[in-house]
Image (spheres, coloured by chain):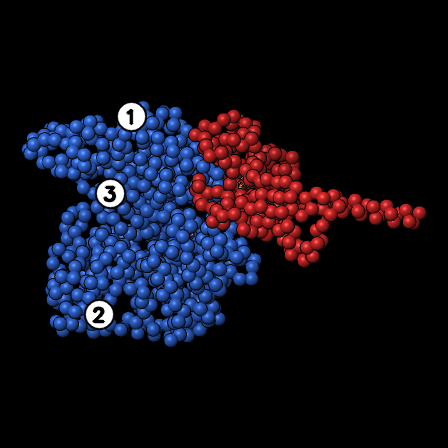
Amino acid sequence: MIAMDIDGRRVVTEEGRTLLDAAREAGIDIPTLCHHEALEPFGGCRLCVVEAAPADSRGPAELVISCLAPARDGLVVRTASERVKEARRTVLDLLLARCPTSDVIRRLAAEHGVPRTSFPESTDGSKCILCMLCERVCAKIGAHAIGGAGKSRGKRIAAPFDLAAEDCIGCLACARICPTGHIGYEETDDERKIWGRTFRMVKCEVTGRPLMTEEQRSFEAKRAGLPEDWFTKCPESKRRETAETIAKAFEEVR
Amino acid sequence: MKLDGREAFSRAGEAARGRDAGRTVVRVCRGGGCRGGAAVAAAIESTAREAGTVLAVRSAGCHGCCDLGPVVTVPAAGLFLAGVKPADAPEIVTKVIGAGEVPDRLAVKDAATKKRFAREAEIPFLAGQTRIGLRNAGRIDPADLDDAIAAGTYGAAAKALTTMTPEQVIAVIEASGLRGRGGAGFSTGLKWRACREATGDDRFAVANGTVLLEIDPHAVLEGLLIAAYAVGAHEGFVFARADSARAVALVKGAIETATARGLLGERILGTDFSFTVRLALGGSEFVCGESTAVLRAIEGLVPEPRVKYPRSAERGLFGRPTVLDNSETLALVPVVVARGPEEFRKVGTAESPGTKVLNLGGRVRQGGLFEVPFGTTLRTLVFGLGGGVAGKRRFKAAMVGGPSGGILGEADLDTPLDYGPLAARGAIVGSGNVMVMDDHSCPVDVARYFTHSLAAESCGKCVPCREGLHHLAEILTRITLGEGTPADLPRLRALARVVADASLCGLGKTAPNVVLSTLDRFEAEYRAHVEDRKCPGGVCRALTKFEIDTDLCEGCQACQKVCPTGAISGAKKQPHRIDPEICTACGMCRTKCKFDAITVV
Ligand SMILES: Cc1cc2nc3c(=O)[nH]c(=O)nc-3n(C[C@H](O)[C@H](O)[C@H](O)COP(=O)(O)O)c2cc1C
Ligand code: SF4
Ligand code: SF4
Ligand code: FES
């Protein structure tokens, strides 16, 4: 058991939890951008910074990122001190200058007292904040189709060599996880376009609704060791089918 | 042949030391910095052969003063000759080696007193150093294992492996107070202990940093071997930047020869301990030297720093406990083990025992590598060893700690060069680079230059460094172009503070040093840029107007000759004049004027 002081409150948590986990469990809100429960922590956006110091320390507290800093017994944590707020405001100010067209960033910045950026705005229209959630989710799935290229301010998300993403299976995990909606895609009932590729959709046998891309089906089948024709019905149809079978069984019993 | 025990090792040492018995050894440096050493060596060899003089001409690694090279030494006589050319060979063979007389032109001129010295022990900038990490600099051929063994290298490792337990080694390193020389100054002993005590089946030991690899690769390998023994690692890497071809070749050769002699590899020196070392290459980018980026590079990933939870000592390379030390730190380890912690603590300060290799450069008379005890003042370094500011200029500032170091001014000259005192003044030990600036420099422009280049070096992972450094550089650029406003100064300060506070790795945390330290010390010059539209240093062209002081001008026409725009007129022996309409403020004339007549208005 670990007991900490977060913003003057006694918060108890377990070994292995982060400061962010502990704060959230206690209902204390800390903003995050590059964090996602299902993915390895990254520590890039720095929005989740908090001040932390051991209770017996006389030196200045450390500014740490709560999404990665482990909870430790006796830690005194401040999630909204002037220093924390200043760092957060500056991060949002910088992101706003980078992505002035992103509603998500605009709203978040405004909430933290940054109605407009104090830096020259970039004009390339990009909404990418380089949180790398897309790269990480793509890697987690196992496709490794996209990733960061370049460094410094020129860093961007791309497929290898800036070509169409050869390993992409068109699953849209990246577009769905992207907090700012930077990753564009087009979709019809028959086709899906993303990362310079066009995918054909597999349709549900029952409803005729698009199920997944063909590449995604092969990928999932291979990964799960299932035949490709396993994926023929949408989850809804499957559920309905099961319900019907059960209902039928009941009827027969009766 | 493999050395299978301590006895075989000491016999090998005697053999190596005795191999030149009856011959005079002459060493010619083949450091990376100076060219021409090979030709000098060949000339001395052939001259000696013709004269029937029996010499052993051997190579030497870098002495750390490449502006004096090629250097020829005669170790037995303690002689040190600088700037030697092949044509000097006859005189070297007959006079220097034959009679112990050194012609004046080959003796080293002391930058401060202009006196000439040929005896190494008398040359002030060498004699004033305490060379421990650099103990073999220029004294051995870094490509020759026998040279290393003759100098005692691997003796401390032999002692550790055969007479000490790993615990005892760690205790000795802890007691010595040795701190990492790679920049952060973390306790090496604590780091080793954390790695030893971490849970895991096997461990790794990694050497990082290039300088010592070029000078004394076996000392680094010996230190790495001791580290591996102490933490219990059986595999290790030496990480070198692929672009330093010389270091790469030397380390590769050193690992091979040491392994062949049984000083690395399986059952080292006949003991139960095995340690295999491999060379790992990385990019030339600044951030590639950061410890977690190094480990990622060895794993074949993009060399991006990661947040240090957990610490590498607990979960590092390929998920195993890993100890990573700077090569200078490792080169000191054998000294601590051989001479004991008390001896090591006799130099330096209580907090930072021992010495630090500093690389002095910029507008100083004698630059190069200077190894001095921690606590030596900046004044001693610049004015004592470095001989003061070059030319007739005055000291204005020194950037201490490398590209992400801080700028210290005249009032800071008595600062002891040590982690605490430097940090208190906004500078760092960092890479140990010290760059001197004279009164013809502009702190704002220096801040712009380094911030701009570090912004480009940012790996792009975290927001404060990637975006913040960019905007700091932009603001500074505007100021140097004469487009700044007084409101820029508090904005610079506020942004720099957050970048330093909130960045992920040392690059972003230290990059703002140059901004904050110049703002602290040279605020008046910043104000002159944004309020009066003037650059007092005469560097920022948009804000500089040069004028010739007619009282000082001797009419020598030196300035006229270098002015690329033809803006300067005036007859010989008559005061000259700069036409402000034509002048582009490039400052060429000012570098040439011997009478300091060209002034900034
Ligand atoms: C941006 C950056 C660059 C660095 N470059 C180097 C380097 O070139 N060589 C080096 O030894 N350490 C470098 N370091 C320091 C390493 O991260 C690490 O602290 C050091 O190698 C550990 O060894 P030590 O404890 O012996 O100092 C760098 C650190 C940062 C933040
Ligand atoms: S595209 Fe979206 S998810 Fe990917 S790095 Fe950019 S902002 Fe993050
Ligand atoms: S501080 Fe800079 S170099 Fe270090 S991780 Fe952040 S962006 Fe990369
Ligand atoms: S959420 Fe913690 S650094 Fe991004």
Mark closer to the observer (3, 1): 1
Q: Is residue B554 above or below residue A150?
A: above
Disc marking residue B172:
none
Residue behind label 3 places its C-beta within 8 angstroms of ligand 1: no
Q: Secondary structure at mark 3?
A: loop
Disc marking residue B533:
1
Distance (Cα) linking label 2 and label 3: 38 Å
Distance (Cα) linking label 1 and label 2: 64 Å
Which residue: 46% across, 66% down?
A: B275
Residue behind label 1 places its C-beta within 8 angstroms of ligand 3: no
Subunit ID for the residue under disc 1? B
Count of all numbered marks drawn on residues in the image: 3
Instruction: Note the chain letter of the blue one.
Output: B
The image position of residue A79, as x and y in percent, is 56, 34
Which residue: 34% across, 48% down?
A: B432
Distance (Cα) linking label 3 and label 1: 26 Å
- Colour given to chain A in the rendered image: red
The image position of residue B215, as x and y in percent, is 31, 59
Q: Nearer the viewer, residue B97 or B421?
A: B97
Q: Is residue A142 above or below residue B547?
A: below
Disc marking residue B363:
3
Circle nearer the N terminus (2, 3): 2
